[in-house]
Image (cartoon, rainbow, N blue to C red):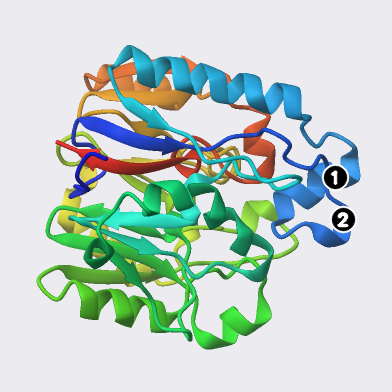
Amino acid sequence: MNRLNINNEMGMLKTVVLGIADDFGGPPNESECYDPKSKEHVIKGTFPIEKDLRNELKQFYNILIKYNVEVLRPNSIEKLNQIFARDIAFVIDDKIIISNTIEDRKREVNGINYILKSIQSESILKLSDNCRIEGGDVIVHDDYIFIGYSNEEDFKKFKVSRTNLHAVNNISDFFSSKKVVAFELNKSDLNAKENALHLDCCFQPIGKNMAIIYEGGFKNSNDIVFLNNLFGKENLINISKDEMYNMNSNIFSISDNVIVSEKSFDRLNSILRKKGFKVEMIDFSEIAKMEGLLRCSTLPLNRL
């Protein structure tokens, strides 16, 4: 396969794994939900159906192909949600790290075993057993690695706490030449508007020196100060609690000037265009019901 190379979120995308909704198992029982937004839609009877999910992923696939991206797909596993490919593994520089996910999601990585078998073993990193991490909490930004995490008390308390400090330290050891910055996130198993499920649910760099941010997702105000200083306050696009709930920060960059976004994000899409981005809009509103969106559905392997 093509070499692994991910240094940031917006280099020209060459190869990506895009999730699938084939045989995703249908609506879970309320007790089987592992995020509050999915539970909300199960209770309301509005949880998405497979046909709609497949259609939305097809729209995304078509946009990626339009930009000459090589798109790989997981092998389908019966009755398993495999839409959110971001979380099962992630690439930093020329290494792929296998995530230590929650128990409910451990089988998902089997869908990309054929890809892992094509990668040299020295390029595959596995974390220590005490580490827990999902790829949505990891954002690569040139010299920086940003990681969203929960402290030990929150990690034991909340099912939506997916990354612990052990994983932050393990990543720091693997990439000692990088500046690893960890952000503690606000969590809620009951209220999706109070829950930053992953770091990319409340923050994402875009373009050459900009980012989308929901400040309420961060537990510590000094982290907001750090990001304001790093990017420049004028280069941060602040989104509201409702926009965070609708996954506005979870768009996807094909390059530093092309962004794939949900068509209903009127305010954000307008701002992006005014800042010079080409915005490719698709319908991803059903997938959003499961507390994930465009970035969550992708596992980039190679960017220029």
**Quadrant (top left, top right, bottom left, bottom right) of the N terminus:** top left
Residue 301: image x %, image y %?
30, 44
**Quadrant (top left, top right, bottom left, bottom right) of the C terminus:** top left
- Tell which residue pokes out farthest to the top in this image: 66
Identify which amino acid the numbered label 2 is placed on.
Glu
**Residue identified by numbered label 2:** 30
Mark 2: which secondary structure? helix
Residue 145: image x %, image y %?
24, 62
Write down the quadrant of residue 63 in the picture. top left
Q: Is residue 77 left or right of residue 92?
A: right
Q: Which residue corresponds to the image point at 84% horizontal and 34% vertical from the top-left?
A: 46
Q: Is residue 41 visible?
A: yes
Compare marks 2 and 1 and give the one earlier in the sequence: 2
Identify which amino acid the numbered label 1 is placed on.
Val
Along the line of sight, the residue nearer the viewer: 223 or 177: 177
Q: Which residue corresponds to the image point at 69% horizontal and 64% vertical from the top-left?
A: 104
Of the numbered discs in the image, which one, if any, rests on residue 42? 1
Residue 204: image x %, image y %?
35, 46
- Mark 2 and mark 1 residues within 8 Å of each other at the beta carbon: yes
Of the numbered discs in the image, which one, if any, rests on residue 239? none
Q: Is residue 263 visible?
A: no
Q: Which residue corresponds to the image point at 48% horizontal and 48% vertical from the top-left?
A: 112
Q: Is residue 283 left or right of residue 207?
A: right
Label 2 crowd (10 A; few <14 / some 14-19 / many >=20): some
Along the line of sight, the residue nearer the viewer: 183 or 145: 145
Quote the CA–CA distance across marks 2 and 1. 6 Å
Mark 1: which secondary structure? helix
Along the line of sight, the residue nearer the viewer: 228 or 51: 51
Examine the rendered structure and indicate whether residue 181 appears above or below residue 249.
Answer: below
Examine the rendered structure and indicate whether residue 130 appears above or below residue 302.
Answer: below
Examine the rendered structure and indicate whether residue 13 appears above or below residue 193.
Answer: above
Examine the rendered structure and indicate whether residue 300 appears above or below residue 217.
Answer: above
